[in-house]
């Protein structure tokens, strides 16, 4: 699974940077941002692999990846399942669906935003 070398704006609500979320997520916020960036913004689902995550974050093994995924699942930010070679995930919508709807409407109207 190869990622395109493109940059794009990603929708992260500023409320995510509050103390309560930091306590739940810690360093896994970086993985959460990455998963949002590569997800389909209409369905909020995506697929990646441990290898891609390890390479993206410079990790030497899967232990940190498992720990980060576990924190995100336990905190209620994502649901995921593992297949043989990949991680299939869904971003859990925030209590307020307004942000997801605004992003989906934007993508529907303008397409994704490429900064390349």
Image (cartoon, helix red, strand yellow):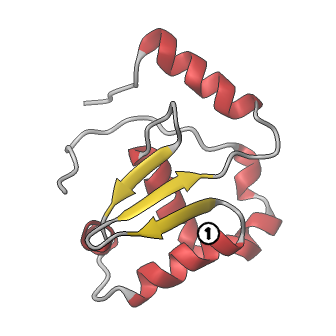
* 61 to 87, vertically: above or below: below
Q: Residue at x 65, y 52 (%)?
A: 92
Q: Residue furthest front?
A: 83
Q: Which residue is mark 1?
A: 72
Residue 21, image x and y in percent? 75, 65
* 72 to 97, vertically: above or below: below
* 65 to 81, vertically: above or below: below
Q: Residue at x 75, y 46 (%)?
A: 94
Residue 102's quadrant in the figure? Answer: top right
- Decide if residue 30 is in sight here: no
**Left or right: 9, with 49 as reference point:** right
- Decide if residue 91 is in sight here: yes
Circle 1 residues within 10 Å: few <14, some 14–19, many ≥20? many
**Left or right: 51, with 43 as reference point:** left
Q: Quadrant of the N terminus?
A: bottom left
* 2 to 54, vertically: above or below: above
| Element type at mark 1 | helix
Residue 39, image x and y in percent? 44, 44
Q: Residue at x 26, y 70 (%)?
A: 85
**Left or right: 20, with 7 as reference point:** right
């Amino acid at each position: 699974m190869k990622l395109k070398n493109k940059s794009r704006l990603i929708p992260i609500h500023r409320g995510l940077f509050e103390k309560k979320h930091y306590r739940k997520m810690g360093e896994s916020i970086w993985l959460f941002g990455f998963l949002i960036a590569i997800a389909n913004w209409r369905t909020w689902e995506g697929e990646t692999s441990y290898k891609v995550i390890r390479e993206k974050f410079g990790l030497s093994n899967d232990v940190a990846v498992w720990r980060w995924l576990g924190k995100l699942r336990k905190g209620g930010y994502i649901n995921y399942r593992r297949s043989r070679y990949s991680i299939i995930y869904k971003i859990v919508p925030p209590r307020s669906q307004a942000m997801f709807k605004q992003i989906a409407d934007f993508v529907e109207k303008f397409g994704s935003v490429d900064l390349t």
